[in-house]
Image (tube, rainbow, N blue to C red):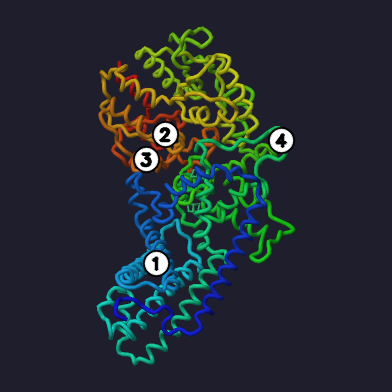
Amino acid sequence: MTEPGREVFWNINFPWIMFILAGIAVLLACYSVYIHIKRWKVGQPAGRANNWWKRTAAFIALAIPDIIFHLKFFGIEKPLRRRELFPGLMHFLIFSGFMIFLLATIVGIWETSLKGNVYLAYSVIVDGFGILAIIGILMAIYRRYIWKPKRLDRKPEDLAALLIILVAILTGFAVEGFRIAATELQTNPGWAVWSPGGWVLAKVFSGMSQSALLGWHVGLWWFHILLALWLFAYVAFVNTRLLHILWDPVNIFFRDLGPRGALAPIDLEKTEHFGADKIEDFTWKQLLDLDACTRCGRCQDACPAYAAGKALNPKQVILDLKAHLYEVYPGNLKLGKAETQREMTGGVITEEVIWDCTTCRACQQACPVYIEHIDKIIDMRRNLAMEKSQFPEAARDALKSLSTRGHPYRGTTSTRTTWTEGLEIQTVEDAKDIEILYWVGCSAALDERNMTVAKAMAKILGAAGVKFAILGDEEACCGDPARRMGDEYLFQTISQQNIEIFRSHNVKKILTTCPHCFNSFKNEYKQFGGDYEVIHHSQFLAGLLREGRLKIKNPTALKTAYHDSCYLGRYNDIYEEPREVLKAVNGSVTELPRRRTDSFCCGGGGGHMWMEEAPDKRVNERRVEEIMRSEAECVSTACPYCLTMLEDGLKAKEADDRIKAKDISELVAEAIE
Ligand code: SF4
Ligand code: SF4
């Protein structure tokens, strides 16, 4: 050979056997895919086989870089980026290295015309990515078996999978090394360095006789091929974590493209069975989610309930549901169905676990493969609430109050307008030409501590000359606590009543101080025909300050931290405006270690504002401990739940003298004095 290149199947007799074996492996893999699809189809319709163009565009733009680079965390908050750098890089090296090594090997088998510089470039790329994959595998072994982060569990299959891939790549290099030692090293040593993996080993083998080199080459070639094909069939057929390579792209493709903050509604007229009681009650997409889990544990790491020592672990929920799915529908060759099955809701997933969730969305934000934990938990809650009437006692009381008094504050003697005493606040009934409806919300109207937020807002709106009005006694709850506690019937009743009230007053623009009301009106009322311009007070205040409608005369002197509310941040991407407001009144913001997308829940969402928590497992106290370790003299927030939970936590930790909790509107109201 006068120019760089190599003979395909050099030294190999009967290479067609490999093609037959490869064909069998591919058929087995296709059959396995068919069985998995059959298993998912035991679930309910999901409404996700739609928007194909949008899905394809979103997949190409977002998911492909995510899949290849595992870099969901890059480009977002620094602490999270740092925390995920090692696993992100490790996955990138293994995945891209192994895939390119594999693809290039297939191209090398088929392609007979690789010659000259093309051959040399091909050779260095294949070997380069093979070496990167080896580095990635060694990082994975170090992380899983020496570093041992708490979020990773260890099963024998994990080590086996890593070692099999490692051996497959190393034997690939050894085969190349024997070939180079027998050919290029003697005739064209300049070419050999372009295959660095094989070249290093060829140097090691160079003392062997020609016949030994030929013998080792052919023997190891077949071992390498059989191992690679077995690995392929094993990945497709045996239910190991390696299967996520197949299902993750599919799961990402079918992910929820709707507003993040909206739970799927139940068609109450047509549905006879509410929520998920059995595994078949989940949708096919929810079942696909279970297969897509990589067991990476990022959701476990992010979960405030788990961090506070509660029974809930989102990763375990997914793994337990998956184990249950395979228990009820077993079989690799033929899909079976178990005659008897364990109770799922309240059994496989205990009631305690189901009620522990604050719906903070940290798990879903962290999950690299877009698994949707919350809707599964809410579906199980719906079953407990609507079919079995099984609630924690305090949740039952809150829902009862919601249904009879229009708010979840059971013991209050305040009315919707108590906070307006001494102020001149118009109701929509009396007002004319209002700019915006100020939806006060249950907390600011009825909870004594939060009434100061409503008063602060009234003062600010007055100072800025905003024409606003409130609904007064016509205002009720937005329904969020009912929906998050699983009582979909009550939520839909409330939302339809509110939509009717808005319609009767021709309401188009709504201002809220509560991110839960904001999320319901903005993302969920559309499901029932209510479509409004909804503005959170953090956005509105930032706008007033930007426009110069508010003048800061008395900036606060306290070092003020900002606590991101889950429903404002993770659900609705509002991170900048509250900080903009704080900078205007304070000059700067003291950032907490966990912030923005990585923020740690206050513990009040998902109905937990009204539920009891064991004193040693309080989520708010975990957050307060973090605030106490910061330099903050004041912690501000833009959510009434967070305000209550943080203030309670500061009191419980006897830190309320040192650190104040305030809503951003209170800080603005003080600053414009
Ligand atoms: S939503 Fe929050 S509390 Fe619920 S499982 Fe996910 S991380 Fe945990
Ligand atoms: S659900 Fe997502 S984040 Fe949690 S372990 Fe599975 S893949 Fe990882």
Sooner in the amino-acid sequence: mark 1 or mark 4: 1
- Label 1, label 2: how far apart the Cα atoms are: 43 Å
Question: Closer to us: mark 3 or mark 4?
Answer: 4
Q: Is residue 240 visible?
A: yes
Q: Contact, CB < 8 Å: mark 1 with mark 4?
A: no
Q: Secondary structure at mark 2?
A: helix
The three-letter amino acid code for the residue at tag 3 is Arg
Expressed as whole percent of the image width and height from the top left, the position of residue 492 reads: 62, 29
Residue picked out by circle 1: 137
Q: Contact, CB < 8 Å: mark 3 with mark 4?
A: no
Residue nearer the viewer, 466 or 585: 466
The three-letter amino acid code for the residue at tag 2 is Leu
- Label 3, label 4: how far apart the Cα atoms are: 42 Å
- Label 1, label 4: how far apart the Cα atoms are: 52 Å
Look at the image and tell me in which quarter the N terminus lies.
bottom left
In the rendered view, would you say 204 is above or below 496? below
Residue picked out by circle 2: 646
Question: Closer to us: mark 1 or mark 2?
Answer: 1
Residue picked out by circle 3: 595
Q: Contact, CB < 8 Å: mark 1 with mark 3?
A: no
Q: Is residue 303 visible?
A: no
Q: Is mark 1 within 8 Å of ligand 2?
A: no
Residue nearer the viewer, 424 or 609: 424
